Image: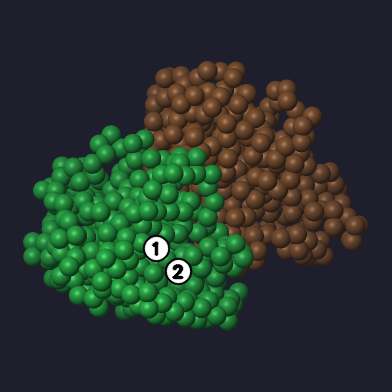
Chain colours: A brown, B green
Amino acid sequence: MAKMTMVQALNLALRQEMERDENVIVLGEDVGVDGGVFRVTDGLHEAFGEERVVDTPLAENGIVGMSIGMAVYGLRPVCEIQFSGFAYQNFHQIENHASRLRWRSQGRYHVPMVLRAPYGGGVRALEHHSESREAFWAHIPGLKMVIPSGPRSARALLVSAIRDPDPVIFYEAKALYRAFREEVPEEEETLPLGESRIAREGDDLTLISYGAMLRPTLSAAEQLEKEDGVSAEVIDLLTISPLDDTLFVTSVKKTGHAMIVHEAPMSFGPGAEIIARLVEKAFYYLEVPIGRVTGYDVVIPLFAREKDYIPSVERITHEARRILET
Amino acid sequence: MTTNTKGTKQAGEVDRRHALHLLKSMLRIRRLEERCAELYSAMKIRGFLHLYDGQEAVAVGVLEALTKDDAIVATYREHGHALMRGIPASAILAEMYGKQEGCSRGRGGSMHLFDEKTRFYGGNAIVRGGLPLAVGLALADKMQQKNRVSCCFFGEGAVAEGEFHESMNLAALWQLPVLFVCENNLYAMGTALKYSESVMDLTSKVMSYDVSSAAVDGMDVLAVEIAAKSAVEAIRSQGKPFFLECRTYRFRAHSMYDPELYRTKSEVEEWKGRGPIKTFIEKMKGQGTLSDADIETIEGDVAREINEAVAFAEACTWEPIEDVARFVYSERRMP
Ligand SMILES: Cc1ncc(C[n+]2csc(CCOP(=O)(O)OP(=O)(O)O)c2C)c(N)n1
């Protein structure tokens, strides 16, 4: 198996899906000749031509709205928005149309499109270039909101997202794009949308995370094992919405301690929904109140303070110890 | 309605002092940008950095036409506009360093320079984001009977976005005093104009909204200044918007790095040959109004200004962590 960065793994998924299904079309600003801001679509223009790898003008609403139309007619558009913060421009098309067309037409019209966008910190740029606002999309019924946590899951989930009959918002953590390599099989691999996974097994505490925060969460779990003899189980959500609560509810029933780690601001973030599910389904198993380590309810600060904003291994272990000692 | 303004005709009449001022202004921007590039490589400035080299004549020429009461709305490529508007280089550089003495408290960096005193309503990292804001400022001015102009800078890439068209229509429909300055540098990141516009003559687009317009050589500072002055005059006397297209070119990559697969090296070199500073120096020298000693004096002044600004930014401080939640909500009380 080849070791790949997340950028390479995503590129592999796009390339293979385009080879497999001629209906898969990639479109967006500078995705063609330039190969995308982060080079995820590198080489696709040469390989598949300008009919299938379409450079568009600056027109986010147009890109997404057209993708919906194309999808309704049976194509499989994968559109790229250069930064997730620019997808607010096309919020209307996703919220009012992509997510509702199936429902409005009572299951007759389908919107099998994917909107890919880099999200989160790691490039030390301002605001919309660094923020983590997956909750906006997760709140919309009819959409799937997916966030992989590394090269291998990114590849497998993107393949599933492209084949999925529903519209999928696919967030890619910029901090992970080139951070590390993982073995990614050349042969086809998929992961089911709407299913979380156990990233690390443990008995004392359940840490629930996803995307770029999975790595610091796993490191914190290692540290807790080594320094405190605490065995933490780590759940990687993979899909934010629809939320799979089976694994984390089962896990918390076992450990009695739960904590959520995400980069998004705290209030009304994905953690809030996870806590609600735990309260509904595992309340009597909880030994102490649930903890949260998240971004803060402010605009993500510029580079000087980025590291204070994004949850770190230290903040995670600190909160875990507080919970365990309660 | 499209008029072409030729700078050459009037060039001889421009007095030497004003010409030296224009030259110095362009050099202040150029040297600031060059220093920014170095500071970025030295990791003093982080994130993304969009430099203005090549387009200096636009900010310099247009801002000559405005008064201190007018408002400016700019983009993420706005260091030059901010500097010309009178925000000190020190406050601009401190901002790019992310320091609290910066003009946006170190929270905006390169793309979000703001300054109330000079009525600088921001850089804006969202392409076309500033257009309706400028129209709104102008609408408020009209409602409050203030005779001011709102000047909005944007790249030609913004013309493909929906808000551009909403803004043009609203400004014309309600007769609002907005100067729309389109800096057409031919490329939106890697996308050439011909891949982005069905009609490449941008002035003919705004004609359909009944917005008056002119296209001008954006590499010629005098031509830009003259065109901007007559545009502002028209806005003030008729209370209607004006669209000024400045045809220009960006010498560097879109941001600090891009593979530049979309254009050839020779094209860049050709445009550099037409650079606004180079040609202006040649013109002045040709007229005998500029000596090497003049250039030396100007360069000396500019170098001093930039060096002092860098020293200032270095010495500035980070916003304390306790303060980062300030201004999420207003600190004012309800009346
Ligand atoms: C809404 C939005 N989409 C995409 C981007 C990414 N982006 C930043 S600048 C740019 C090109 C803009 O070109 P143009 O308007 O011509 O201005 P220039 O950069 O040439 O000054 C793009 C695509 C953005 N900042 N905002």
The residue at 23%/41% (across/down) is B201
- Left or right, B104 with respect to A177, comes to left
Gap in Å between the C-alphas at discs 1 and 2?
A: 14 Å
Which residue is denoted by mark 1 in the rendering? B78
Which residue is outermost to the left?
B238
- Earlier in the chain: of badge 1 and badge 2, it is 2
Q: Secondary structure at mark 1?
A: loop
Please state the chain letter of the residue tagged with numbered disc 1 in the rendered image.
B
Which residue is denoted by mark 2 in the rendering? B31
Q: Secondary structure at mark 2?
A: helix
Q: Is residue A262 visible?
A: yes
Answer above or below: position of B211 versus B332.
above
The residue at 75%/28% (across/down) is A185
The spot of residue A168 in percent (x, y) is 53, 34
Q: Quadrant of residue B134?
A: bottom left
The spot of residue A194 in percent (x, y) is 63, 34
Q: Quadrant of residue B300?
A: bottom left
- Left or right, A140 with respect to A10, comes to left
